[in-house]
Amino acid sequence: MSDAELLDLGSSIRDRFGLKLQDLEAAPTIDEIELRESRVKSKASLEHLLSADKWSRAEHTLGKNLGDFVRGLERKYDNPPDLVAFPEDEGDVVDILDWAEEEGLAVIPFGGGSSVAQGIEPIVPDTFRGVISLDLRKLSRVLEIDRESRSARIQGGVLGPHMEDQLRPHGYSMRFFLQAFEFSSLGGWIATRAAGHFATGFTQIDDYVQSMRVVTPTGVMSSRRLPCDGAGVSDNRMFIGSEGTMGVITEAWMRLQDRPSFRASMSVPFSKFEAGVGAIRALSQSGLYPSNCRLLDPVESLLSGAGDGDDTILIVAFESADHDVTPWMNRALEICREFGGRVESDKPADSSQGAVGRTGAGGRWRNFFVKGPYYKEGFARMGILRETFETACTWSAFPELHARVVEAATKAVKKECGEGAVACRFTHVYPDGPAPYYTVIGSARRGGEVEQWAAIKAAASEAVLEAGGTITHHHAVGRFHRPWYDQQRSDVFAAALTGAKRAVDPGLIMNPGVLVDA
């Protein structure tokens, strides 16, 4: 974004929430960044795959959460990798892991670098001689397509847009458009159990994985390609969500979708948030399975520009490659009316309009959502503390969880920022519960932003766990969520996970400090 666009955005935020803006802080140039000297010398036979240049090491130092942007603006790149590896095929990955284990080097798998949970920052114990960031960007091809089974074998390093470009000529899509789609990789989605485009039905990447190949320090794991498997504990499930702690996902067979040709989208306002919650719960349990089913509370609708802050807005959409979705939309709108939703038209937008879901309140929210990754650095530059956290819980648990979380986060915002707000939206809904996603916004204290957010995040996270929610619905554990992840999981499972890691990674070189310490 240009500085002029940032200033316009900042003025809008200031007017809506009464926040104090600061002069735009200049983003650093590569010449202003100082990195410690590399502690590792490349192995001669691998030298063509390894880089120690400043740009590569800086690029692989920080992720994309508020603290990362703040430290970047402060020119603090304290934990750079010593080397960055760019393997060109699976054999190169094997060779790099073998060498790293021999030399006592930690390995951090790297996809697109979009982690907001410190999952790719090279923070490792001093027992390691150095750190390698293993970047899979050269493993970026769709290798094979099985039309009968509507699936494709895809390399793990491919970024979202490049993958879709390769699938489009064949009439397919994964329809997995998470917010970081442009900056994240297939392997990263699998490793972090990412959630994508669909708000119901196929939501998390788990639903798309048919089989996979993972290079571990003890060998290559290749799972059998099946539509469903009841043969004991799933080998796929052991590595989905492993966050680079057990190996490197080099390729996977993924389930695809036919590209949709029928679409419908509507935005429905509700006078009360509770009425919107009732409507979206009914939708999630109706068997209609809308592709989009998002609920924005009044503060979230104001923040995103979808509304004026008076109403809760429910955005509902359907899509299909096979049939007209109008009957499904009509029934969804009936449900909304039953809960007091103000349905303004009996005719939802259709595909003939060419921009379904891109006009009205839903379109304004979509535009804000898509641009979100570009806004984050801008907010930090202008002195606005804006960050998010999300969870999931049962429908019966939601009222108490929501009340506790909003109260705890609001108190923390007032204490740390003076003024600000806490907003809520549902990103995904299931028959048994929602995934509430909270946005925190306040005035930042220059030089103290990391501490401000840490205090707010801690208060909110404690409230989430106390009310029975999960510490993360789709943003992974990384190093940032570890304190609460350790509380959430049972001791029995922690011991089992530790044992599994030791079996595939006896040298404990893979992404140390993430998920387990062993």
Image (spheres, grey):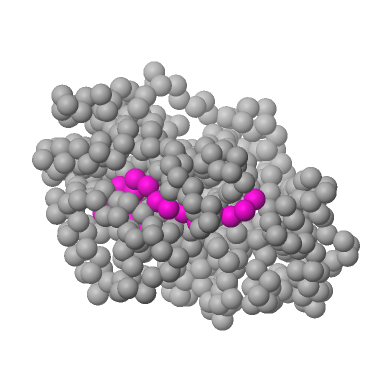
Q: Magenta segment range?
A: 240-259
Residue 55 in sight in this render: yes
Residue toward you, 404 or 49: 49
Query: Toward which corner of the image does residue 371 lie, by quadrant?
Result: top right
Which residue is pictured at 68% across the width and 56% down the height?
321
* Residue 137 place in picture, x, y as percent: 40, 35
Query: Toward which corner of the image does residue 491 lie, by quadrant?
Result: bottom left
Which residue is pictured at 68% across the width and 53% down the height?
260
* 465 shown above or below 54: below
Residue toward you, 504 or 305: 504
Which residue is pictured at 88% across the width and 65% down the height?
346
Magenta span includes 92: no
* Residue 234 place in picture, x, y as percent: 33, 67
Residue toward you, 30 or 516: 516
* Residue 461 place in picture, x, y as percent: 44, 64
Which residue is pictured at 58% across the width and 66% down the height?
201
Q: Quadrant of the N terminus?
A: top right
Residue lying farthest to the top in this orientation = 31
